[in-house]
Image: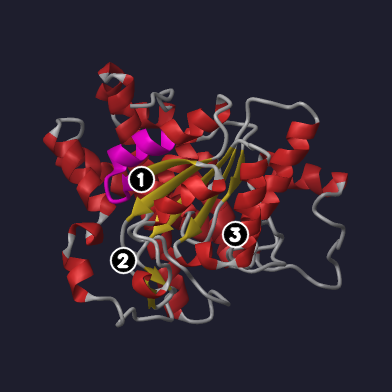
Amino acid sequence: MVELASSPEINEAFPRSASLDPSQSLLLRAYRWMLLARTTDEKLAALYKAGGKISGGVFLGTGQEALSAALGMALRKGDIFSPLIRDLAGRLAFGEPVSDAMRTFLGSKEGPMRGRDGNIHRGRIHEGQLAMISHLGAMISTTAGVLLARKMRGQTGTVGAISIGDGGTSTGATHEGLNLAGVERLPMVAVIANNQYAYSTPNNRQYACADLIDRAKGYGYEPHSVDGTDFEACLEVVGRAVERARSGHGPQMVVGHLLRLTGHGLHDDASYVDPKLKASAVGADCLRLAERILIERGLAEEGELAAMKREAQAKVEEAAAQALREGGPDPSQEDWAAISDARMLDRGLAMRS
């Protein structure tokens, strides 16, 4: 397993974790990010259903947290991360505070987009997290452009990671972006969450190849396939792909096989999902599987997991309450300077607390 440094937060929540080896500590860290993402999503869903609290859609990452968290954890400061709508776990693991999500969804003027943009378009470009573009595939070209600029400057040692779903791989922008990164041998890691449906369109109406990983060779990417419900396997496979890209082996493609355990958004009841898929291995809940593994291996006890859940709940509730107190921007008083302006960079860094 790829080894990453242990987290002080994990050591506080699990005092005995200091005696664990790096791979064991890594599993606890991954579970923590997955849990925090799930807890945040559940709070956002409750605020949405309460009516009037959130404008626009709410899209949950339920069932995709393991793959997303593994990607965020594999990245380093200086890397580029281009998340999509179900990547809250990866965002958090890469350094985004819970307050960024809450402030953006609730329209707070103190959020990273200062209450100006839609719920899912937040980002901190100066910290390596690109603000999401809704048009599927567009983030691949954007990330490739950043990596190409770095290549032209002779900058090495960093990677660009993008997330996309199985449906998004059918767009022209995806082809153009993947092709550019392949031709230029850019250190890109494309992680495809094959959640079986492009909104309501099943795989067999979305692509003709036997497996999406079959496309890797055509684009000049090294292929990696993983069970997206297994958080340990995701950490291993995604971590290896990121290190391969970082060490000069060219672009990498990872396909995670899983099932979106909710509708496309909270407006969608997902009645079109085949019950057989829900009952199959691909329909397993990665968070519940992670809890079982931690307990079976003696890495955590039921009481410790319960304490971590309470901790995550408290953090999420605090972030939501803060965002609700802050209120939205006043159009007549707003400084409409671009976020790339030096003034706004200083302000954005200050707001990160």
Check disc 1 and report the residue beneath it: 225
Mark 1 vs mark 2, CA separation in Å: 20 Å
Question: Element at badge 2?
Answer: loop
User: Of the residues under marks 1 and 3, which one precedes in the sequence?
Assistant: 3
Mark 3 crowd level (few <14, some 14–19, many ≥20, 10 Å Cα): some
Is any atom of residue 313 visible in this view? no
User: Of the residues under marks 2 and 3, which one precedes in the sequence?
Assistant: 3
Mark 1 crowd level (few <14, some 14–19, many ≥20, 10 Å Cα): some
Check disc 2 and report the residue beneath it: 261
Question: Element at badge 3?
Answer: helix
Residue 116 sits in which quadrant?
bottom right
Residue 69 sits in which quadrant?
top left
Could you tell me residue 55's position as x and y percent?
58, 77
Check disc 3 and report the residue beneath it: 174
Kindly identify the amino acid type of the residue bearing the numbered disc 3.
Answer: Thr
Could you tell me residue 32's position as x and y percent?
35, 41
Q: Nearer the viewer, mark 2 or mark 3?
A: 3
